[in-house]
Amino acid sequence: MEHYCHDPLPGQGYIRLATIHPGKFEDDIVVSFHTSTFPNNTLPYEALSYVWGSDKSHTPIYISEDNTAIANGSRDVSQMGFKQLWVTQNLDVALRHLRYDEAPRVMWTDALCINQTNEVEKGPQVAMMGEIFRLACRVIAWLGPDENDSNRALHLMNYFGSQVEVDFVKQEMRPVAGCTNRSIGDCNIGLPLQDRDVSSIYHLLCRQWFERLWIRQEIYLAGPEAVIMCGLNQVKWSSFRRGLACTYLKHTPNLTEQFNTRMNVLHGFIFQENFNKLMDLDHKYNNTQCLDPRDRLYAVLAMLKDDEKALIPSPDYTQPYDKLYATVVRNWIGSNNSLNILCQCRPNDGTCPSWVPDWSKPDTRSIVFAPYIYMSPFTSWHEFPHPDVLRVMGVSKCVVSEYHQLPQLSNHRNILLEQIRTLLLKVDLEEKHATKDYTRLLAHDNFPYSFDPPIFNFPDFEVAEQCVEFIMSDRDINGASNKK
């Protein structure tokens, strides 16, 4: 059977829409494409947010070049001259769940509607994706088939979400008017969750969809009709998100450590703001995944403030990612007359210049050592004698002779203290610094009287040093003396 090749788009102001023809779940999937100007309010469409899945497992769908709906049960794809288009197993399963039995369904799906083999076409299409999702009549977030009691988890999230009103900026919650259970909106009362409930919600929140970087703009730019779909069941995204916030904000004693850790990982997803800065890339999106390193920037483009968006060139998948990153950093430094973005740099394998953050690699530094600590309000002299060279003026302070990699630090206080103890004792065996040096390191040398006027949100040096002495002692971290 002949392989399908996309016809070229007429220009940059066009998109393809896919009509999914009706059929039973087990029928072969038949799709027709229609080219439309964009934006075009005369042709409503739904947009699909999903996980591509493994490139090692593909299955064919069939492309009909006749856009007339094909009656269910009246086709034999082997006799109808259809062409084949190979898609991932994940997309095949999603389309089977989304397909109607008796009516066609018009959708925009990146793997189908963008010619993935044409790097030149991909750039302008990716640049429009924020608007494609924003203007869709509905966005469907496909989490995957029904498994691990996912229907129960969806029901619980929807129920909790229906009982509360959430201020996502202040991260506050209260009972919604007309709720049936006011205790759900009380942060001091735990959620009425049984072990089965906890397990079902945990497994749902561990699905790959929550790991994808692209879904941040896909779901947050979506309209009010957006839904979360798992198997054949779906709930409104707005209610699901309130349910997530409710689960995060309430203190529920019987939640497992795994569950709490997962909720902490999803904090940025739950309370995400629509507009971000390039300086937020590591902090907000470091634990997300994308297949192409250029998408570390392209996938958040639609959510950036206009002045920051202007620093990123139009999406171009023919350009190596290290060149893209370097261009963006040069633009940022020139626009802000500041070197603060260098705080996102860390040791790399040499793919990028040392002054260019390699956003394609995970940042293993702990949030304890927040990058903003290293920022300066002062203008820094700099020049670029060569596109790959940044020259700055500085003062020689010290030489770094050894670099110790931080472990992935725990969210559990006592485990965190044990990790810091292990690291400090390891360093101290070799360096033998005074306790005050480690105190300044762990507190980033920020104490009340380091500022004028003093900032009393920071700990006193003496108190901080006592904490470091405790950490480096042989006293039991889990003992009664460690209560504050």
Image (tube, rainbow, N blue to C red):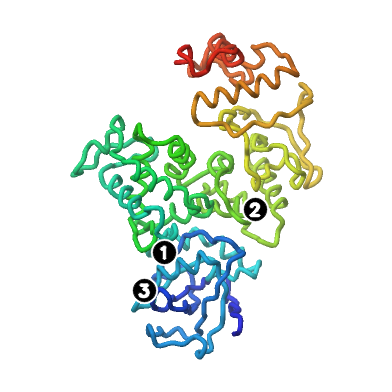
**What residue did someone put label 2 on?**
293
Callout 3–callout 1 Cβ contact below 8 Å? no
Amino acid identity at mark 3 = Tyr
Q: CA distance from mark 3 to mark 1?
A: 19 Å
Which numbered circle lies on residue 100? Answer: 3
Amino acid identity at mark 1 = Ala
Residue 19 visible in the shown view: yes
Amino acid identity at mark 2 = Pro
Seen at 42% across and 85% down, the residue is 68
Where residue 460 sits in the image (x, y, percent)? 53, 12
Is 287 above or below relative to 50?
Answer: above
Label located before the other in sequence (3 or 1): 3
Question: Depth check: 354 or 212 in front?
Answer: 212
Question: Depth check: 461 or 137 in front?
Answer: 461
Extreme residue in the bottom direction: 79
**What residue did someone put label 1 on?**
136
Q: Secondary structure at mark 1?
A: loop
Label located before the other in sequence (3 or 2): 3
Where residue 263 sits in the image (x, y, percent)? 44, 40
Crowding at dot 2, Cα within 10 Å, few <14 / some 14-19 / many 20+, comes out as some
Mark closer to the observer (3, 2):
3
